[in-house]
Image (cartoon, rainbow, N blue to C red):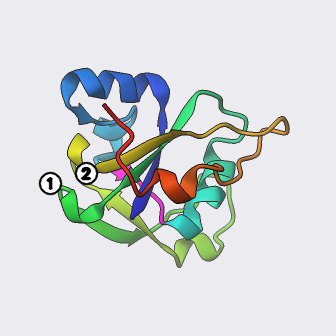
Amino acid sequence: MIFHIARREEWERAQLRRAYSPQGFEAEGFIHCSTLTQLLTTANRFFLGHRDLLLLCIDENRLTAPFRYEAAVPPAGMLSDDARERLFPHLYGELNLDAVTATMDFPCGADGKFTMPAQYGAGCVKKLIP
């Protein structure tokens, strides 16, 4: 299981198109994903304070686009740290919706930080999308 943090409006557009690609996909050429252990670090580093986000639970065995784990490049202005050594899942194509086993709200707290959604345990096991 891998995860992707999506903006709600982008996910809603994907329902109409029957495929998902976030803003920045065309420029970067891939969709950023995270493992469970990387998820909160990713959320708090890149989405701190963002509202109206969803967490997509993705079965990588169902992906139709090429997928691989690659080293992360630290954001501009950050000193190189252990992020360069960790491998992150990247999807090189649009996300086929049938690979998404569940979606759930992913709100930040009052301080803007993220914690694991309470419904995570059951949520990623069953399909929650229409």
| Residues shaded magenta | 31-35
Question: Residue reaching furthest right?
Answer: 111
The residue nearer to you, when weighing 19 against 30, is 19
Q: Residue at x 35, y 71 (%)?
A: 69
As helix, strand or loop, the secondary structure at mark 1 comes to loop
Residue 97 locus on image (x, y percent): 24, 41
Q: Residue at x 56, y 34 (%)?
A: 53
The residue identified by callout 1 is 64
Height in image: 45 above or below 53?
A: below
Dot 2, crowdedness within 10 Å: few (<14), some or many (≥20)? some
Q: Residue at x 83, y 35 (%)?
A: 110
The answer, for residue 95, to whether it is visible in the render is no
Q: Are marks 2 and 1 in contact (CB under 8 Å)?
A: yes
Nearest to viewer (mark 2 / mark 1): 2
Left or right: 70 with respect to 51?
left
- For marks 2 and 1, the one nearer the N-term is 1
User: Which amino acid type is marked by label 1?
Assistant: Thr
Question: Residue reaching furthest left?
Answer: 64
The answer, for residue 13, to whether it is visible in the render is yes
Q: How many marks?
A: 2
Left or right: 127 with respect to 83?
left
Q: Main secondary structure of the magenta part?
A: loop
Which quadrant would residue 40 be assigned to in this image? bottom right
Q: Which mark is residue 55?
A: none
- Does residue 9 show up magenta in the picture? no
The residue nearer to you, when weighing 72 against 108, is 108
The quarter of the image holding the C terminus is top left
The residue identified by callout 2 is 99
Residue 78 locus on image (x, y percent): 68, 58
User: Which amino acid type is marked by label 2?
Assistant: Ala
The quarter of the image holding the N terminus is bottom left
